[in-house]
């Protein structure tokens, strides 16, 4: 676990306490409680090659970013963290560890942008990918080759919220010398800690729950292995995709309330998923917290709670889905997720449009699937809003 430089945190403290203090200490000069935003590109040196405080140039390192990297590393039970300008920049750095001919096994319902990065960018560099349904560890085992370098997992997945057994998959991959990477964006370290389950690297789109307020874009990679840290820090500096100081400050502000926010996200999502499941206009609900979810027992074992994302299909298919998504008033029709405000979207035509229709169908992603990012508003306002929008999309008298 990350050894925080501050006296206020230690490794025995609980998540909620570390979320507020880890990586941060009062400003030694003036005692400012909040980490200053170091708006500087360069730092004075006492003599050539003797930087006064260890910093030389803000692409290589900036104190506000260092505080955030320490904070997230502590939350992920990692030894280190490296922050990037977006979640995809973080994934790009991870993939930059590979060479032509290397092979990657990845889950087949990854975030659309990750799939695009793999197939449109890294396939051109000669990296080979096999996409599998990772909810069955046997599929992962079968896909491993002598040249496989990475197993790239997401759980819960986006947007079908399927769960893979991170511990079993990690064990299978690591026994073959394969590095295990988990995109923990949907769960957050409050609900799930992939490194504790055997993964080597955990990454986030911090844009979502870690930021939590839909006002900043960023990504992070965390791990324990010092060699991996050195290679990734080299790439972070060499390619220059790192996070700026103002954005780092906004994420530090976000993580302080992560635990509180996640508790309410989970509570609201659970209520909405249960009620949707009983609604006659709803054909299917995807939420790992429902007993009807095929991996409910695994999710219960692997996660502290089940998260704030709920997907569902109406009986009326894609037309009803489009009407519903355009008819909500509290839920905003928008891409992204994880903010305090509730969002609604239709993945097949929005967040996942970059995945070919045939691939979407193979992964079971219906064109009429609706995805909710359930926020922390009052749950009854959210439910009333969904009810009126469902009624407008599929009037009770018109349901078959
Ligand atoms: C949004 C997202 C990403 C990409 O992150 P950006 O910050 O948008 O670059 C990656 N993985 C998941 C699961 C996401 O939701």
Image: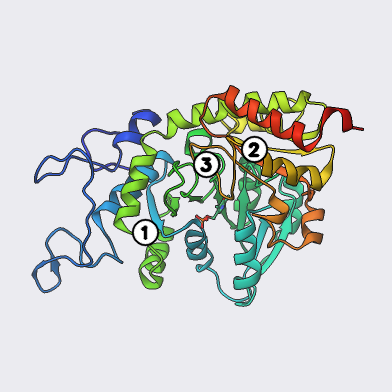
CA gap between label 1 and label 2 equals 34 Å
Mark 3 or 1, closer to the camera: 3
Residue at horizontal 41%, vertical 68%? 235
Give the quarter of the image for residue 14: top left
Q: For the residue labelled by badge 1, is the local secondary structure a helix, a strand or a loop?
A: loop
CA gap between label 3 and label 2 equals 18 Å
Cβ of mark 3 under 8 Å from ligand 1: the answer is yes
Residue 98: x and y, percent?
A: 54, 69
Asked whether the beta carbons under mark 3 and mark 1 sit within 8 Å of each other, the answer is: no
Q: Label 3 neighbourhood size at 10 Å, few (<14), some (14-19), many (20+)?
A: many
Disc nearer the start of the sequence (3/1): 1
Q: Is 5 drawn above or below residue 48 in the view shown?
A: above
User: Is residue 294 among what the camera can see?
Assistant: no
Residue at horizontal 78%, vertical 23%? 278
Tell me, for residue 243, which label it has, or none.
1
Asked whether the beta carbons under mark 1 and mark 2 sit within 8 Å of each other, the answer is: no
User: Is residue 347 among what the camera can see?
Assistant: yes
Q: Is 91 drawn above or below residue 294 in the view shown?
A: below
Disc nearer the start of the sequence (1/2): 1
Q: Where is mark 3, residue-wise?
A: 338
Q: Viewed as shown, does residue 387 lie left or right of 316? A: left
Q: Viewed as shown, does residue 43 lie left or right of 355? A: left
């Amino acid at each position: 676990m990350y050894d925080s430089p501050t006296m206020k945190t230690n490794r025995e403290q609980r998540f909620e306490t570390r979320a507020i203090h880890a990586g941060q200490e009062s400003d030694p000069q003036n005692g400012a409680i909040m980490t200053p935003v170091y708006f500087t590109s360069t730092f004075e040196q006492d003599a050539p090659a003797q930087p006064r405080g260890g910093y030389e140039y803000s692409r290589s390192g900036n104190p506000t970013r260092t505080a955030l990297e320490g904070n997230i590393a502590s939350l992920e039970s990692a030894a280190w963290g490296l922050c990037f300008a977006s979640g995809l920049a973080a994934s790009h750095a991870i993939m930059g560890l590979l060479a032509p001919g290397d092979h990657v096994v990845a889950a087949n319902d990854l975030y659309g942008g990750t799939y695009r990065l793999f197939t449109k960018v890294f396939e051109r560099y000669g990296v080979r990918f096999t996409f599998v349904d990772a909810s069955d560890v046997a599929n992962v085992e079968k896909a491993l080759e002598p040249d496989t370098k990475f197993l790239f997992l997401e759980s819960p997945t986006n947007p079908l919220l399927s769960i893979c057994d991170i511990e079993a998959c990690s064990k299978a991959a690591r026994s073959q010398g394969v590095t295990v990477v988990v995109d923990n964006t949907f769960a957050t370290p409050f609900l799930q800690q992939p490194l504790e389950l055997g993964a080597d690297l955990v990454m986030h789109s911090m844009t979502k729950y870690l930021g939590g307020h839909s006002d900043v874009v960023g990504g992070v990679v965390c791990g324990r292995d010092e060699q991996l840290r050195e290679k990734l820090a080299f790439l972070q500096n060499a390619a220059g995709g790192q996070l700026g100081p103002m954005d780092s400050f906004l994420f530090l502000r976000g993580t302080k309330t992560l635990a509180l926010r996640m508790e309410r996200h989970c509570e609201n999502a659970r209520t909405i998923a249960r009620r949707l499941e009983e609604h006659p206009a709803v054909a299917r609900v995807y939420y790992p917290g429902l007993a009807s979810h095929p991996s409910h027992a695994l999710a219960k074992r692997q996660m502290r709670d089940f998260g704030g994302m709920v997907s569902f299909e109406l009986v009326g298919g894609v037309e009803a889905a489009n009407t519903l998504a355009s008819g909500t008033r509290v839920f905003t029709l928008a891409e992204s997720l994880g903010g305090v405000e509730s969002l609604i979207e239709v993945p097949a035509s929005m967040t996942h449009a970059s995945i070919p229709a045939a691939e979407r169908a193979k992964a079971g992603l219906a064109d009429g699937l609706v995805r909710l990012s359930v926020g922390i508003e009052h749950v009854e306002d959210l439910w009333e809003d969904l009810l009126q929008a469902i009624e407008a999309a599929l009037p009770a008298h018109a349901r078959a």
